[in-house]
Structure formats: C-alpha cells, structure tokens
Image (cartoon, rainbow, N blue to C red):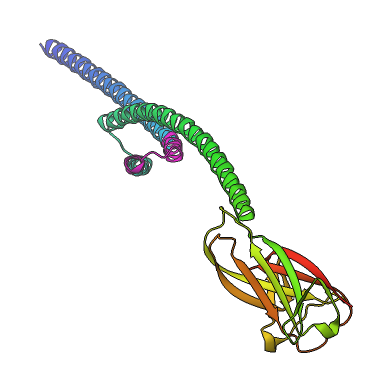
Amino acid sequence: MSQDLTGKSANESERKSKNQSRTIYVILFLVVISAAVGFKFYMDAESENKKLQADLEETYTELDSISSQLDNKISEIEALGGDVTELQLIRKNLESEKEALQKSNKWAANEIKRYKDKVSGYEELLTLQDEKIKKLEAVNKELMGENTNLKKEKNVLNDSISELKSRRKELASKVALASRLKAENIKVYGVNDRGREREDEFRSRQIDKLKIEFNLEENNVAQPEGKNIILRVINPKGNALFDVATGSGSFMVDGKEMFYTAKQEILFDNTKQQLSFVYDRGQEYEEGIYKVELYADDYLIGKADFTVK
C-alpha cells in the first residue's frame, strides 16, 4: 500500500511539473506576442511620425515657393499700375503661417491637411493673379498705343501750331514792314535873316535857319497813331548837329544809340500830311555836303542832302 501511495505522489508531482512548464510556455508566448505587438506599434508610430515630418517639410517648401511667386506677382502688378493692397495682406498672412509651421515640432495629420488645402488655395490665387496680369498688360498695351497715337497727333498739332506761328510772325513782319511810313518830296531850304529861302545849295552866310519840308506818303496798312518824327542833320565830318538847348537828344536804332538834331510828335492820319522842321543852329555852317535823315520812331523814312559853299 505504501508503494501505491508513493506512485500516486510521483504521478502528481509529474503532473504539477508539466502544468508549471505549460504555464511558463504560455507566459513566454504572451511576452513574445506583447513584445512583437509593441515593436509593431512603435514602428508604425515612427513611420507615421516620419510621414508627418515629411508632409510638414513638403508643405513648408510649397508655402515658401508660393511666397516667392506671390512677391513676383505683386511686383508685376505694381509695375503695371494695379492695386496690390489685398495681395500684400495675403502675403503677410502667408509669412505668419510659414513661421508658425516652421516653429512647430508636433503636428496632427488633420492640421497638415488643413495647410495643404491652403496651399491649393494659394496656388489658385496665383493663377488668378496671372489672369489679372494678362488683363493689365492688355490694358497697358492699349493705353500705350493710344498714348503713341496721342503723341503723334500732338506732334502734328505742334508742327501745325509752329507753322502757323511762323506764318503769323512772317505776316506780322510783312505787315510791320508794309506799315512803315515814308517821307516824300523832301526839300531843304536855307533861310537868311530876312526870311528869304534858297533850296539845296547856298553859302554859309546865307543860312540863318534850316527849313526841311516833306510830306508822309499815303499808307493804307499803317494804323492812325501817334508817331515821333526825328530829324538828323549830319555835317561833312559825319556827325549829327546836336544842341540840347534846341531840343536835340538821342534814340535807339537797331540796338545802337544815335544822336538826333530835332524831334516832333505827330498824329499820323494817312492824309499825306505836310510836315516841316525849322532848325536854328545859331552859328555858321562849315562848307561841304550835309545829309538830312528823317526817322519815324526808330526806322529811316527818308533822306536828302544839301551843299554849303
């Protein structure tokens, strides 16, 4: 009977030993399974992180590229005279998003997707700006064409105006020349102290006064107006007889100052009016040929000469 008890005890020990071994195997199996599951979970998470990081970098690169393109579009539109206020605000917002994206280390997939959607929106915006630039270029081209035509028309008009001014100036010059007065029938008398007159040639002792008579030729172009008629009596040496006490003075002819012998102011009325000067020198005349010149304001209207023996 003791042998039976001993056998039962051995069997039970063997059974316990087997159960323990089985338990150990199960535990080891579970540990291996857990390790495998944990490793797979780690690898999946690592792969997801790498994918998110790659998406993050790709999204930043796309935003940076769009930022550069947007700068170019802004410059082009500004050069074409377009309004870039809204684009500058968009660019400012884009730079803020780039900065936030660059600083962040942890991003969820949905956040990255949101930024990728924004990239698509920005790309669409760039396409719209290309269309805007084309329209502005077309408008500018049309305006340049119109401006060129306006310049041509302006040049033609300026040429016409210049030609008209030139013709008017030429006509005014002709009118001014045609309106100049002319003295005719100029006669020079030597008047002695008894009032007797001799014409053209006389002796010095026979001259108490000089008398110059003439009339103004009819001129239908000249306007009725006040005129200064100036007399120059020039001696044989080429000098004008000059005495301030008798009304002599100076005047300008072609930018040159000249002395005159006498002057009188008249109202020209285009009636071939008769005029005369009586000049009392108060001293004898030297022998020789004298010249008489008559001026209206600043131009010569007639001349004559006389001889003193």
Residue 185 in view here:
yes
Q: For residue 256, which quarter of the picture?
A: bottom right
Residue at 41% in and 33% down:
66
Q: Is residue 96 above or below residue 145?
A: below
Residue 196 placement: quadrant = bottom right
* Number of numbered discs visible in the structure rendering: 0
Instruction: From the viewer's perspective, tell me whether residue 6 is left or right of residue 106.
Output: left
Residue 192 location, quadrant: bottom right
Q: Which residues are magenta?
A: 68-90
Note whether 205 is above or below 24 in the view shown.
below
Q: Nearer the viewer, residue 140 or 210?
A: 210
Q: Is residue 161 left or right of residue 130?
A: right
Residue 143 in the image: state x and y as whole percent: 44, 33
Does the magenta run of residues contain 71? yes
Q: Nearer the viewer, residue 217 or 42?
A: 217
Tell me if residue 46 can be seen.
Answer: no
Q: Residue at x 87, y 75 (%)?
A: 236
In the picture, which quadrant includes the N terminus?
top left
Residue 286, position as x, y percentages in the image: 87, 82
The image shows residue 194 at horizontal and vertical percentages of: 73, 86
Q: In this rendering, would 13 be left or right of 36?
A: left
- Pick the residue in front: 132 or 125: 132
Q: Where is 202 relative to 184, above or below?
A: below
